[in-house]
Amino acid sequence: RKEVEQDPGPFNVPEGATVAFNCTYSNSASQSFFWYRQDCRKEPKLLMSVYSSGNEDGRFTAQLNRASQYISLLIRDSKLSDSATYLCVVILAGGTSYGKLTFGQGTILTVHP
Amino acid sequence: NAGVMQNPRHLVRRRGQEARLRCSPMKGHSHVYWYRQLPEEGLKFMVYLQKENIIDESGMPKERFSAEFPKEGPSILRIQQVVRGDSAAYFCASSLLSLDRGNGYTFGSGTRLTVV
Protein backbone atom coordinates (compact mmCIF):
# COMPACT_ATOMS: atom_id res chain seq x y z
CA ARG A 1 0.00 0.00 0.00
CA LYS A 2 1.30 3.46 -0.88
CA GLU A 3 2.05 5.79 2.01
CA VAL A 4 -0.12 8.53 0.52
CA GLU A 5 -2.83 7.75 -2.01
CA GLN A 6 -4.84 10.09 -4.18
CA ASP A 7 -7.28 9.66 -7.00
CA PRO A 8 -5.16 10.75 -9.99
CA GLY A 9 -8.18 12.05 -11.90
CA PRO A 10 -8.20 13.86 -14.16
CA PHE A 11 -11.03 16.02 -12.96
CA ASN A 12 -12.52 18.18 -15.70
CA VAL A 13 -14.93 20.79 -14.37
CA PRO A 14 -16.52 23.99 -15.71
CA GLU A 15 -15.72 27.37 -14.28
CA GLY A 16 -17.70 28.04 -11.14
CA ALA A 17 -17.99 24.40 -10.16
CA THR A 18 -17.15 22.99 -6.75
CA VAL A 19 -14.67 20.14 -6.75
CA ALA A 20 -13.36 17.93 -3.95
CA PHE A 21 -10.17 15.89 -3.75
CA ASN A 22 -9.51 13.10 -1.32
CA CYS A 23 -6.35 11.61 0.05
CA THR A 24 -5.58 8.77 2.44
CA TYR A 25 -2.37 8.04 4.30
CA SER A 26 -1.22 4.74 5.71
CA ASN A 27 0.98 5.70 8.65
CA SER A 28 -0.97 6.71 11.73
CA ALA A 29 2.18 8.40 13.08
CA SER A 30 1.93 11.04 10.36
CA GLN A 31 2.00 14.39 12.05
CA SER A 32 1.76 17.21 9.56
CA PHE A 33 -0.41 17.48 6.49
CA PHE A 34 -0.47 19.78 3.50
CA TRP A 35 -1.86 20.40 0.07
CA TYR A 36 0.62 21.55 -2.54
CA ARG A 37 -0.08 22.73 -6.04
CA GLN A 38 2.12 21.94 -9.02
CA ASP A 39 1.72 23.64 -12.35
CA CYS A 40 2.92 21.85 -15.45
CA ARG A 41 6.68 21.26 -15.33
CA LYS A 42 7.16 23.60 -12.41
CA GLU A 43 8.07 23.23 -8.77
CA PRO A 44 5.44 22.34 -6.15
CA LYS A 45 4.16 25.24 -4.10
CA LEU A 46 2.44 25.10 -0.75
CA LEU A 47 -1.30 25.72 -1.07
CA MET A 48 -2.28 25.25 2.54
CA SER A 49 -1.62 23.32 5.72
CA VAL A 50 -4.32 20.97 6.97
CA TYR A 51 -5.50 20.82 10.57
CA SER A 52 -7.92 18.60 12.44
CA SER A 53 -10.15 21.57 13.07
CA GLY A 54 -10.30 22.25 9.35
CA ASN A 55 -9.10 25.41 7.74
CA GLU A 56 -10.25 27.71 5.01
CA ASP A 57 -8.40 30.09 2.74
CA GLY A 58 -10.73 31.93 0.43
CA ARG A 59 -12.27 29.43 -1.96
CA PHE A 60 -10.19 26.56 -0.55
CA THR A 61 -11.15 24.42 2.44
CA ALA A 62 -9.03 21.59 3.83
CA GLN A 63 -10.08 18.94 6.32
CA LEU A 64 -8.23 16.26 8.23
CA ASN A 65 -9.79 13.17 9.78
CA ARG A 66 -7.12 11.45 11.87
CA ALA A 67 -9.34 8.53 12.82
CA SER A 68 -9.92 7.65 9.18
CA GLN A 69 -6.46 8.84 8.07
CA TYR A 70 -8.14 10.94 5.44
CA ILE A 71 -7.48 14.42 4.07
CA SER A 72 -9.67 16.45 1.76
CA LEU A 73 -9.49 19.63 -0.27
CA LEU A 74 -12.57 21.49 -1.46
CA ILE A 75 -12.37 24.17 -4.12
CA ARG A 76 -15.41 26.38 -4.57
CA ASP A 77 -16.20 28.60 -7.55
CA SER A 78 -13.42 27.09 -9.66
CA LYS A 79 -11.36 29.42 -11.83
CA LEU A 80 -9.44 28.64 -14.99
CA SER A 81 -6.28 29.44 -13.04
CA ASP A 82 -7.02 26.59 -10.63
CA SER A 83 -6.03 24.10 -13.34
CA ALA A 84 -3.02 22.27 -11.94
CA THR A 85 -1.98 19.08 -10.17
CA TYR A 86 -2.86 19.00 -6.49
CA LEU A 87 -0.49 17.08 -4.26
CA CYS A 88 -1.39 15.63 -0.88
CA VAL A 89 1.64 15.68 1.41
CA VAL A 90 2.33 14.27 4.88
CA ILE A 91 5.27 14.36 7.29
CA LEU A 92 5.95 11.53 9.71
CA ALA A 93 6.78 12.37 13.28
CA GLY A 94 10.12 11.96 14.96
CA GLY A 95 13.66 10.99 14.12
CA THR A 96 15.22 11.63 10.78
CA SER A 97 11.83 11.41 9.11
CA TYR A 98 11.08 14.79 10.55
CA GLY A 99 10.94 17.27 7.73
CA LYS A 100 10.78 14.63 5.02
CA LEU A 101 7.76 15.27 2.83
CA THR A 102 5.90 12.23 1.52
CA PHE A 103 3.89 13.09 -1.58
CA GLY A 104 0.85 11.50 -3.12
CA GLN A 105 0.96 11.01 -6.88
CA GLY A 106 -1.22 14.05 -7.40
CA THR A 107 -4.70 14.77 -8.71
CA ILE A 108 -4.99 16.58 -12.02
CA LEU A 109 -7.61 19.31 -12.24
CA THR A 110 -8.64 21.01 -15.46
CA VAL A 111 -11.13 23.87 -15.27
CA HIS A 112 -12.70 24.74 -18.62
CA PRO A 113 -14.73 27.76 -19.72
CA ASN B 1 16.34 37.80 -1.42
CA ALA B 2 16.77 34.98 -3.91
CA GLY B 3 14.87 31.75 -3.40
CA VAL B 4 16.29 28.29 -3.85
CA MET B 5 18.47 28.32 -6.93
CA GLN B 6 18.96 25.20 -8.97
CA ASN B 7 21.13 24.83 -12.00
CA PRO B 8 21.18 23.90 -14.67
CA ARG B 9 17.46 24.10 -15.46
CA HIS B 10 17.86 21.53 -18.21
CA LEU B 11 20.61 18.95 -18.57
CA VAL B 12 21.10 16.46 -21.36
CA ARG B 13 23.52 13.62 -20.89
CA ARG B 14 24.39 10.56 -22.93
CA ARG B 15 24.17 7.17 -21.30
CA GLY B 16 27.26 6.50 -19.24
CA GLN B 17 28.09 10.15 -18.59
CA GLU B 18 27.98 11.90 -15.24
CA ALA B 19 25.35 14.42 -14.21
CA ARG B 20 25.94 17.09 -11.55
CA LEU B 21 22.96 19.01 -10.25
CA ARG B 22 23.47 22.03 -8.03
CA CYS B 23 21.25 23.58 -5.41
CA SER B 24 21.86 26.80 -3.50
CA PRO B 25 19.42 27.05 -0.58
CA MET B 26 17.71 30.23 0.50
CA LYS B 27 19.90 32.57 2.48
CA GLY B 28 20.13 31.40 6.06
CA HIS B 29 18.75 27.93 5.33
CA SER B 30 21.08 25.12 6.31
CA HIS B 31 18.78 22.17 5.60
CA VAL B 32 18.51 20.81 2.08
CA TYR B 33 16.28 18.09 0.66
CA TRP B 34 16.43 16.49 -2.78
CA TYR B 35 13.37 14.98 -4.47
CA ARG B 36 12.97 13.21 -7.79
CA GLN B 37 9.88 13.25 -9.97
CA LEU B 38 9.76 10.61 -12.66
CA PRO B 39 7.46 11.27 -15.64
CA GLU B 40 3.78 10.97 -14.67
CA GLU B 41 4.63 10.26 -11.03
CA GLY B 42 4.69 12.12 -7.73
CA LEU B 43 7.78 13.49 -6.03
CA LYS B 44 9.89 10.98 -4.12
CA PHE B 45 12.27 11.88 -1.32
CA MET B 46 15.90 11.12 -2.02
CA VAL B 47 18.16 12.67 0.60
CA TYR B 48 18.25 15.19 3.45
CA LEU B 49 21.45 17.05 4.20
CA GLN B 50 22.71 19.64 6.60
CA LYS B 51 25.99 21.45 6.16
CA GLU B 52 28.71 18.80 5.76
CA ASN B 53 26.39 16.01 6.90
CA ILE B 54 24.05 13.53 5.25
CA ILE B 55 21.19 13.05 7.69
CA ASP B 56 18.86 10.72 5.80
CA GLU B 57 19.67 9.11 2.45
CA SER B 58 17.01 6.43 2.63
CA GLY B 59 15.55 7.46 -0.73
CA MET B 60 18.78 7.40 -2.68
CA PRO B 61 19.46 4.52 -5.06
CA LYS B 62 22.27 2.41 -3.63
CA GLU B 63 24.53 2.80 -6.64
CA ARG B 64 25.64 5.67 -8.85
CA PHE B 65 23.94 8.39 -6.80
CA SER B 66 25.63 10.59 -4.22
CA ALA B 67 24.95 13.92 -2.56
CA GLU B 68 26.92 16.44 -0.60
CA PHE B 69 26.40 19.80 1.05
CA PRO B 70 29.81 21.29 1.76
CA LYS B 71 30.56 23.99 4.27
CA GLU B 72 30.92 26.46 1.43
CA GLY B 73 29.01 26.34 -1.82
CA PRO B 74 25.89 24.66 -3.09
CA SER B 75 24.58 21.19 -2.46
CA ILE B 76 25.47 18.79 -5.26
CA LEU B 77 23.53 15.74 -6.42
CA ARG B 78 25.81 13.57 -8.51
CA ILE B 79 24.68 10.76 -10.77
CA GLN B 80 27.40 8.62 -12.27
CA GLN B 81 27.03 6.53 -15.43
CA VAL B 82 23.55 7.80 -16.14
CA VAL B 83 20.93 5.53 -17.68
CA ARG B 84 17.67 6.40 -19.46
CA GLY B 85 15.71 5.61 -16.30
CA ASP B 86 17.43 8.52 -14.55
CA SER B 87 15.55 10.96 -16.81
CA ALA B 88 13.40 12.95 -14.42
CA ALA B 89 12.90 16.31 -12.76
CA TYR B 90 15.08 16.74 -9.69
CA PHE B 91 13.84 19.27 -7.16
CA CYS B 92 15.71 20.71 -4.24
CA ALA B 93 14.04 22.27 -1.20
CA SER B 94 15.52 24.12 1.73
CA SER B 95 14.29 25.01 5.19
CA LEU B 96 15.45 27.13 8.07
CA LEU B 97 14.83 24.59 10.78
CA SER B 98 15.43 20.86 10.98
CA LEU B 99 12.17 20.42 12.81
CA ASP B 100 10.31 22.30 10.14
CA ARG B 101 6.62 21.53 10.04
CA GLY B 102 6.67 21.64 6.27
CA ASN B 103 5.17 25.03 5.73
CA GLY B 104 8.60 26.60 5.79
CA TYR B 105 9.93 24.78 2.77
CA THR B 106 10.92 26.50 -0.42
CA PHE B 107 11.43 24.49 -3.58
CA GLY B 108 13.75 25.36 -6.40
CA SER B 109 12.58 25.35 -10.01
CA GLY B 110 14.15 21.96 -10.57
CA THR B 111 16.62 20.45 -12.98
CA ARG B 112 15.19 18.41 -15.80
CA LEU B 113 17.62 15.66 -16.69
CA THR B 114 17.26 13.92 -20.02
CA VAL B 115 19.44 10.92 -20.77
CA VAL B 116 19.78 10.11 -24.44
Image: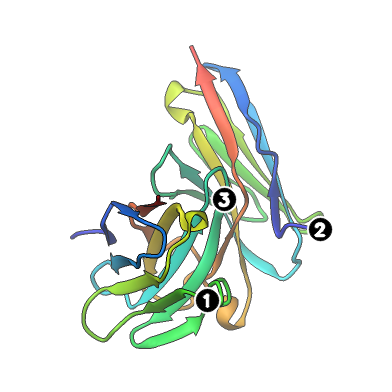
Q: What residue lies at 39% left-to-right and 63% top-to-bottom?
A: B93
Residue type at mark 1: give it.
Answer: Glu
What kind of element bears circle 2? loop
Residue type at mark 2: give it.
Answer: Ala
Q: Is residue B29 above or below residue A13?
A: below
Say which quarter of the image contains residue B40.
Answer: top right
* Residue B105 in sight here: no
Q: Which residue is mark 3?
A: B42
- Decide: few, some or many residues near mark 2? Use Cα within 10 Å; few <14, some 14-19, many ≥20: few
| Chain ID, mark 1 | B
Which of labels 1 and 2 is toward the front? 1
Q: What percent of the width, then of the height, locates residue B25?
A: 29, 68
What kind of element bears circle 1? loop
Residue type at mark 3: give it.
Answer: Gly
Q: What residue lies at 48% left-to-right and 73% top-to-bottom?
A: B47
Q: Which residue is mark 1?
A: B63
Q: Nearer the viewer, residue B69 or B95?
A: B69
Q: Nearer the viewer, residue A45 or B113?
A: B113
Residue sticking out furthest to the left: B1
User: Could you tell whether B16 is left or right of A9 in the image?
Assistant: left
Share a chain, discs 3 and 1? yes
Say which quarter of the image contains residue B30.
Answer: bottom left
Residue A67 disc label = 2
Mark pair 3, 1: CA separation: 22 Å
| Chain ID, mark 2 | A
Share a chain, discs 2 and 3? no
